[in-house]
Image: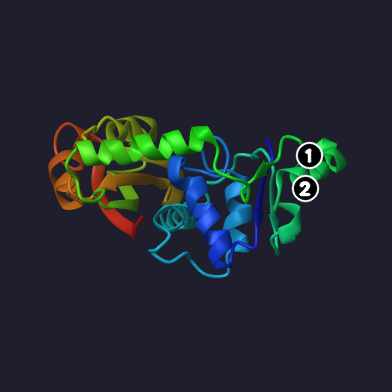
């Protein structure tokens, strides 16, 4: 299903993008894709913290692009420079006329249309969940890129990555990874992770879990390459 955005650098466009990302991690699908790159490139500056969801998404995609970890094709997204004329969305009759004229685009998502019942329900459920938990606001999150170095060129890098991902705790989510050559036949693992700041200490994670037994059978050291609030 194609998704359409209008004038994402305006306040109205950013507001719609922020609302769209309220219940989504990515523009389409369940992993970063070319659709995310398209919208990311259309933004002239990072969304301000006022747009919480759009800002979180932007910095996450920014970190993934530095890792070169976006490869999925996506479902197709259109980013246009200006919002459609007001008369086209002013009344139900105008919307119906446009639908007939653009019959081939029935599957497009109009982000300037009224909020659907499903979107209202999702927003209400999210607000109720936060209220029930007694939180005044959600805990902050961070996106982190790690360099994980093996002992030598004979280290099994597959088992090294398995050792890294075997570390599980509340508030920690592992993301994309790749191997990077460092010389003399040795490769290091670069891996993304997302943490809930109040639940996970990165220093403790590295010192007490990643470079301690049994993981340190494969892992010599871990370094933080990038650390971004999302």
- Viewer can see residue 99: yes
Q: Nearer the viewer, residue 1 or 197?
A: 1
- Report which quarter residue 50 is drawn in: bottom left
Q: Position of residue 100 (x, y in %)?
A: 84, 38
Look at mark 2 in the image and give the residue it sits on. Answer: 94
Q: Position of residue 121 (x, y in %)?
A: 43, 34
Residue at 44% x, 40% y is 23
Q: Residues within 10 Å of mark 1 (few under 14, many from 20)?
A: few
Please identify the residue farthest to the right as the structure is shown.
101
Count the marks. 2
Q: Position of residue 28 (x, y in %)?
A: 58, 39
- Viewer can see residue 30: no
Q: Nearer the viewer, residue 101 or 184?
A: 101
Is residue 37 depicted above or below 178 in this figure? below
Q: Nearer the viewer, residue 91 or 80?
A: 91
Look at mark 1 in the image and give the residue it sits on. Answer: 105
Mark 2 vs mark 1: in front: 2
CA separation, marks 2 and 1?
A: 16 Å
């Amino acid at each position: 299903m194609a998704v359409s955005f209008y004038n994402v650098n305006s306040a109205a466009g950013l507001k719609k993008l922020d609302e769209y990302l309220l219940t989504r991690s990515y523009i389409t699908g369940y992993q970063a894709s070319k659709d995310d790159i398209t919208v990311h490139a259309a933004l002239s500056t990072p969304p301000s913290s006022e747009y919480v969801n759009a800002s979180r998404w932007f910095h996450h995609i920014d970190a993934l692009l530095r890792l070169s970890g976006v490869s999925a094709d996506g479902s197709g997204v259109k980013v246009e420079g200006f919002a459609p004329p007001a008369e086209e969305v002013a009344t139900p009759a105008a919307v119906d006329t446009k639908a007939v004229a653009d019959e081939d685009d029935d599957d497009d998502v109009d982000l300037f249309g009224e909020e659907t019942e499903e979107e209202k329900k999702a927003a209400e459920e999210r607000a109720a969940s936060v209220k029930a938990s007694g939180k005044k606001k959600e805990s902050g999150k961070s996106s982190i890129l790690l360099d994980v170095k093996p002992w030598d060129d004979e280290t099994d890098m597959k088992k090294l990555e398995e050792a890294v991902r075997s570390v599980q705790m509340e508030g920690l989510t592992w993301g994309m990874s790749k191997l990077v050559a460092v010389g003399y036949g040795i490769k290091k693992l670069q891996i993304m992770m997302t943490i809930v700041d109040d639940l996970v200490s990165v220093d403790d994670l590295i010192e007490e879990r990643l470079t301690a037994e049994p993981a340190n059978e494969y892992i010599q050291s871990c370094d933080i390459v990038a650390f971004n609030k999302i």
